[in-house]
Amino acid sequence: MNEYVKKIIDLYTKACLGDSAKIKFQNWLTEDTLADEKEEALFEWWNQSNPTVTKDTLEALASVKSKAQQIREGSKKRLIIWRYAAAIVLILCSTTVYLFSRTAEPDAEVIEYFTQAGEMDTIHLPDGSIIQTNSRTILLYNESFGKDNRTIYLSGEANFKVQKNEELPFIVKSKEFSVTALGTEFDVYSYLEDPYFRTVLISGSVKIQQKGNVDDYTLYPKDQFLYNRQNEEYSISKVDIQEVTAWQRGEFIFRSATIPDILCAMERKYGVSFQYKSNIFNEDKYTFRFKRESSLDDMLEIIKSVSANFDYKQTGESYHITAVSR
């Protein structure tokens, strides 16, 4: 079985993957099934890293490997953290892994949080600030947080209620952007596999700055900063705060979203995978609002009835989707 795991990891490190395949590989690697075999295979892969990868990637691999060795005997949740980090290092480019390689000085301790699929966590920071994290979110910060810095590294989605401290600005860093606040509440959406980065200000004010760009953008209450990673365009607009914070209440809201976008969000939230051919869905956009008590199957049935162009069959945690002729 270990050889089987090794072959899968080797295949995905050498292949040119689409977004859907990247997400499926991330989900598979972070599942508890065959956890020991995955850990052993990843450590072996690190020891035999391809010499053609970039220096930044190797530094990131070494950093994650070091953290993994330190926590290998720890709790299951902490093991999942490094497996998820490893998945990102393996299948995304070196431009995305600074999150894991440059979070602190070499001898500093990094505090790590990982919110598992289908769950939300509340984190109380040393400075009194409170963070609520959404499904499959990673948060990292230095153990000196609140003393000489207030910097958080984020992959995923989180709501921040920031304790005011004018001497130490509160900074949230993601792949391309940093969001700076003094005392405020805001929401940051930055899943590495998602084509969009989003920040919405709920109260106070924040400053957004893109990595490598001297310009910055100031948001005011109800402002949304939306950045498209594919065409590198951004927009600032007013939004409904109740919709933005719906995930904190367990609600699921989609506005002008394609079916693949909706399925991707469901994969992340429920820890399932959807198997389908890329040509099944077009670019039609839909708006749905699901209450907290709605089950995954309830939502799929509603989406299926509205779109009227697909059917599905569940096998364990996988959903196989097929086209239906109109």
Image (spheres, grey):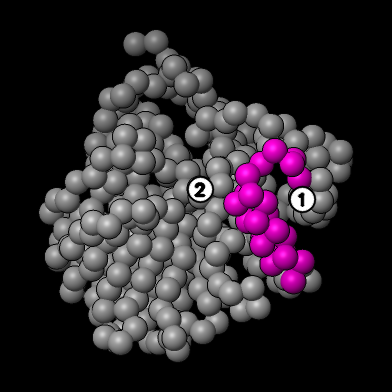
Q: Quadrant of residue 261?
A: top left
Q: Quadrant of the C terminus?
A: top left
Asked if residue 199 can be seen in this view, the reply is no
Q: Quadrant of the N terminus?
A: top right
Element at badge 2? helix
Is 83 left or right of 171, judged from the image as shown?
right
**Percent position of residue 171, x then y:** 36, 71
**Percent position of residue 203, x then y:** 18, 72
Whichever of labels 1 and 2 marks the residue nearer the N terminus, that label is 1
Which of these two is toward me, 215 or 15?
215
Q: Quadrant of residue 232?
A: top left
- What range of the chain is rendered magenta? 49-70
Vertical placement of 100 versus 203: above or below? above
Magenta segment includes 64: yes
Amino acid bearing label 1: Trp
Which of these two is toward me, 324 or 95?
95
Q: Which residue is mark 2?
A: 95
**Percent position of residue 74, x then y:** 73, 73
**Percent position of residue 319, x then y:** 55, 33
Q: Which residue is mark 1?
A: 46
Vertical placement of 40 versus 91: above or below? below
What secondary structure predominates along the stretch shown in magenta? helix
Q: Which residue is rendered at x = 14% and y = 51% of the image?
A: 237
Asked if residue 285 can be seen in this view, the reply is yes
Vertical placement of 6 versus 224: above or below? above
Q: Which residue is rendered at x = 24% and y = 76% of the image?
A: 184
Element at badge 1? helix
Q: Residues within 10 Å of mark 1 (few under 14, many from 20)?
A: some
Amino acid bearing label 2: Thr
